[in-house]
Amino acid sequence: MEVVASIVSVAVVKTGEALCSTIKNIAKSPQQLHVLEMEKKSLMALRDETTKEIERATQEGMAIKDRATGWLKEVDELLRKMNDQIQEAKSSRCFLSCSTKRCRISRDVAEQLKEVKRLLEVGSSIASSVAHSYPEVKAVEHIPGPSIQDQTASVSEDLAKIMTLLSDDKKGIIGIWGMGGVGKTNLVRNLNNKLQKNSNLRFSCVLWVTVSKKLDIKKLQMGIASRLGFHLEQSSEADRMAIQLYRRLKEESFLLILDDVWKKIDLDKLGVPRPEDHSGSKIILTCRSLDVCREMLTDVEVKMSILRDEDAWQLFSRYARDVVSSEHIKPLAEAICRKCQGLPLAIITMGAAMRGKTKPELWKHALNQLRRSVPVAEGVEEELYRPLKWSYDSLEGKDLKTCFLYCSLFPEDFSINIDKLVWYWLAEGLIDDRENYEVFYSRGISLIENLKDACLLEDGSDEGTVKMHDVVRDVSIWIASTCSEDGSKSLVRTGEGLKEISTTELSNSLKRVSFMDNDLEKLPDDSVIRWSEASTLLLQNNPRLELIPEIFLERFKALRVLNFSQTSIKSLPDSLLQLDDLRALLLSNCEDLEGLPPLERFSRLQVLDLSRTGIRELPKGLEQLSNLRHLNLAQTSKLEVVKAGVISKLSRLEVLDLSNSGYIWKEKGAVQEEEACFEELQCLERLQVLSIRLKWNPCYTPQDTITSWLNGLKAFEISFGRSSYFVSVRDLCLLSDAFQKRVTMEWIDLSGGQIVWLFSNASYLRIKSEGLNEMLKDLVINNVGRSFTYLKKLEIFYSDNSFWTGGLASQYELLPNLEDLVLVKMTGVESISELANLFGLRFQKLKTIHMFGCPKMKYLLSLGNSIRTMPNLELILVVGCDNIEELFNYLPLQINMAPDPITPKLQKLELVRLPNLRNLCRDEKTWPGNKVKVEVIDCSLLSTRQ
Ligand SMILES: *[C@@H]1O[C@H](CO)[C@@H](O)[C@H](O)[C@H]1NC(C)=O
Ligand SMILES: *[C@@H]1O[C@H](CO)[C@@H](O)[C@H](O)[C@H]1NC(C)=O
């Protein structure tokens, strides 16, 4: 730039001299022209330099001064004009005789020289500063909104948590997620404002960007840029902007807050350096779905929880004002607040909607509306329901949406059993029904996980269940009854104590109807009820309902799912047979139901649940249900006959549940004529889960075909004798990650029994029978050198003997994978070592030991050569063993052996009623670890030191 400037000044001087001669020196015109050309060159050089400078500055996102662009424009204009005229002058040299013309040219040259001189002068100062410099960036900008002082304790806690994360260098991207309306924006806003007051802020700037549902990268870029006070050309490509933004952000140690993110934002495309590549910077994002966090590769996710009761009430009263404390309104207000289940948005909207309303009637009305999931006021629909509906709208795929709506058919605060939900979805055609049980079940689980990640479902109160937040459920019902995707409506009136269904409500556009958990005494039976398209009808748990009128079912011909469980019906009307499309007929717990009409017409039926009914024999025509996949006959204690060749014809059957049924299967040869035998079950080639009772016959060893069929199942429970507690098929398959194969033997005489065929694939064995010792002895003697690798859990109850001592000691390990050991009322046993010696156990995989009421027990286990540590043991529970003195002891001569930590993974030790327990272990240095949670009750000799 300096070089150019000096050229310019020389040129200017020369121009000045040349000008003196002016018009008189017309003869010198060609020379003057020469000067002008030189000046022009200088100007062009200056122009090029300036243009480059502008380009550079633009790339850095700096704003170009108007003066600079204006100057460039002027220069270009002049140069263009000059070019034209110089051309003209050159070509007119031969006409010099014409004085007027000469005169004009000369005058023009002079003028132009003047102009060039001016532009050169102006330009020399512009070229060095074409752009505005960056303005000073404010570190934090205040975001208006209620401040934390007015907020609840829960918000303060969450805020403190995030503050801690901000000072953790390893947490570059922090995801804050939670359901709509739970207060995520409020939280980050308060965080932002708190940082503003922070005097030693570790960020040079905190950038706040609201992303919102429709992701617009360019808009975000412009937003960040303008916050940083630098300029992006709106017209340029997003990629170009990204480069500029990136360069600029690299100069800062920033905290970027991305509020309300709905889908993945590609940081590279946005132009934001990743915190991992740019230390000192962090990103916080808020979103409704854990999926978004995952996609954004967050380093830590904080799930925002709903408000605690006190907080909720405090917030509600603040918005609804003092009226809430008046005597007649308070209970109603509390009920309304409870309905919001701690969701701040709901509380605030409801509070504001009821603000200052002094008439109890208005509150009563609002509560009633709420109970029916109707938006109480216009504001509620706009501010609560619609925002929450966005979560629904953003679910991917129509089926997932329908699955979500389906969950609202269940009562408020109801824990929905996942397994059953999945069967419903299957029957409704929401899950591909060509897949087998295992596959479609995992499909169901993944749908549920999707909904959970979107905060539309949450874990239920028991394992294996899910439920809906009350407000979400209201919104779901509202969507289903007004604006669902497929145009279908639902009618949900659950748990309202209804005694009747009003026929007017059953309009014909209903797709799903739920009157579950009411007090219905009768169903509409007049011909006024209209024909309905409904595919699901849930009437379960109406204990007084005794009769299903013929005409009622006639109006529901499109049904796929019908649940009449837990009613007092004694029979089903013949009109049932007209439901050609039925997939799931659920009649569990109808204890008065003794029989069904012939079922052969239900060729599409997939699920038949007759558990806990009073049926005495299988329904007629059952064998023709060629699509039946799940037959539930659990706890049918009156079922005593199963005819041969009925169940075995159900070629698609995947789950057969006869647990605790009255029917006891026997092997071929032991059955009466026409009675079904155990062997015929192997015709069920698709079966995956089986639960039956089998008659104990000590000498029975089935053919290999049977054992290999049995071993091929995913899960089974075979129970011999009188089973004392009930394991549902669901527990077999779903509660643990692994499918279980259980064998229970209760109240039978085991002596001399051949049970290897059963043992070989079982994962869980429960024995509560006589003859235990003989059986175990046989087992050990006859199986030298082999092991039962699948067995993970062993429970032994009630035995008076000690274990047979001639066992394997430590030569072979019969149960190498044992994880859980339960011994109850083993009155002859002195220590677990007896069992260990018998089976050669080394307990390397053992996770839990439970020991109840073993009065002779002196110590739990002695340590020595074969067992020195139990590397995986997590829990020890010992209850009511009167004589136990210590938990572990060492075999003589081995006391000095330096032991490893005996139980490095122990987490919990519970000792209850052990009056003689003195020591945990002789070598206390090694035991127990310090992270162990110890609970000691009624162990008077155990010094508190331990
Ligand atoms: C039908 O209703 C009963 C009673 O509430 C319930 O136990 C069962 O799970 C329901 N069936 C299905 C498939 O959900
Ligand atoms: C036994 O069960 C396991 C899983 O529990 C399975 O992988 C194996 O193939 C089964 N069959 C035999 C013959 O062991």
Image (cartoon, grey):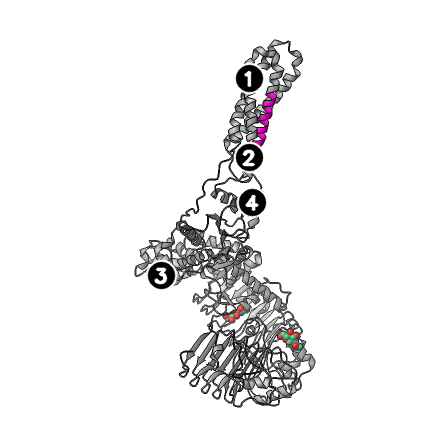
Q: In the picture, which quadrant includes the N terminus?
A: top right
**Residue on which the image places disc 1:** 17
**Secondary structure type for disc 4:** helix
Tell me which numbered mark, 1 or 2, is placed earlier along the sequence: 1
Q: Which amino acid does label 2 sit on?
A: Ile
Which residue is under mark 4? 242
Check contact, mark 2 vs mark 3: CB within 8 A.
no
In the displayed structure, 782 sits above or below 19; it is below
* Magenta highlight on residue 41: yes
Which marked residue is nearer to the observer: mark 1 or mark 2?
Answer: 1
Give the percent coordinates (x, y) of residue 248. Answer: 52, 44
Mark 3, residue position: 332
Location of residue 72 by image quarter: top right
Asked whether 260 or 813 is in front, the reply is 813
What type is the residue that disc 4 sits on?
A: Ala
Rendered-image quarter of ligand 2: bottom right
x, y percent for residue 815: 60, 80
Circle 1: is it few (<14), some (14-19), or many (20+) Cα within 10 Å? few
Q: Mark 2 vs mark 3: which is more N-terminal?
A: 2
Number of numbered discs on residues? 4
Instruction: Give the main secondary structure, helix, strand or loop, of the magenta stretch.
Output: helix
What distance separates the C-alpha of mark 1 from that of mark 2?
Answer: 34 Å
Residue type, numbered disc 3: Leu
Q: Which of 448 and 666 is in front in this view?
A: 448
* Residue 382 vertical placement versus 19 (above, below): below
Tell which circle, 3 or 4, labels the residue nearer the N-terminal end.
4
Quick one: which residue is furthest to the left in this view? Answer: 327
Identify the mark nearer the N-term, 4 or 2.
2
- Check residue 54 in the rendering and tell me which mark sits there, or answer none: 2
